[in-house]
Amino acid sequence: MDWKHLLLAAFAAGLVSSLTDWFFFGVLFHGKYYAYPEVWRSASGKSETKTIMIVTLLGFVTSFGFILACDVFAVLGYEATLQLAALIWLLAPLPLIVANALYIKMHPLLVVSHSLGWLAKLVLAAVAAAWFGS
């Protein structure tokens, strides 16, 4: 995959994953964040725009890194990229989220939504890698 396709795929996946992040991390079970309000940073009347922008940019970094890994390791096609996405999800985000929830007060439904959000982000990157890589 040339750099133009790689950047286009990463941009497309990052853009769409920002919408899934909004759904899984912001909308789905939103009220459950209030189950343990002392755990979450309070904006105390300040805008969260800067924090949201940083987190959104990290989604683009995740997409770029995944697509670059697919290119470097010659992971081609939908089946292979989706398998890699599932493996990465099982290796990193899922165990981290569950482990954090064991030590940090998190409502169980937030653990589910954050885990599914990461799976969605990786699946979108996999689809973009396969689509733009072919």
Image (cartoon, grey):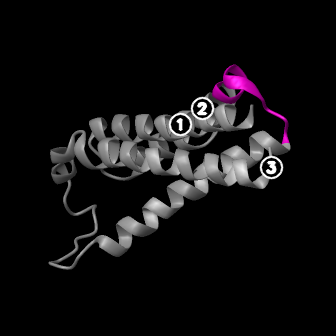
Give the label, 3 or 2, closer to the camera: 3
Kindly report the secondary structure that dominates the magenta region of the rendered protein.
Answer: helix
Q: Residue lying furthest top in this view?
A: 79
The magenta-colored residue range is 73-82
Q: Position of residue 54 (x, y in %)?
A: 45, 68
Nearest the eye: 106 or 16: 16
Tell whether label 3 touches label 1 (CB within 8 Å): no
Q: Is residue 63 left or right of residue 109?
A: right
Tell whether label 1 touches label 2 (CB within 8 Å): yes
Query: Which residue was labeled with disc 3?
Result: 2
Residue type marked 1: Leu
Q: Position of residue 56 (x, y in %)?
A: 44, 60
Q: Quadrant of the N terminus?
A: top right
Secondary structure beneath disc 2? helix
Q: Taking 90 as reference, is 96 above or below it?
A: below
Query: Which residue was labeled with disc 2?
Result: 127
Residue name at image x 69 percent, y 45 percent: 67
Query: Which residue was labeled with disc 1?
Result: 124
Cα separation, mark 1 vs mark 3, equals: 19 Å
Tell whether label 2 touches label 3 (CB within 8 Å): no
Q: Examine the structure image and report whether residue 65 is included in the region drawn in magenta.
A: no
Residue type marked 2: Val
Nearest the eye: 12 or 121: 12
Can see residue 90? no
Mark before the other along the chain sequence, 1 or 3? 3
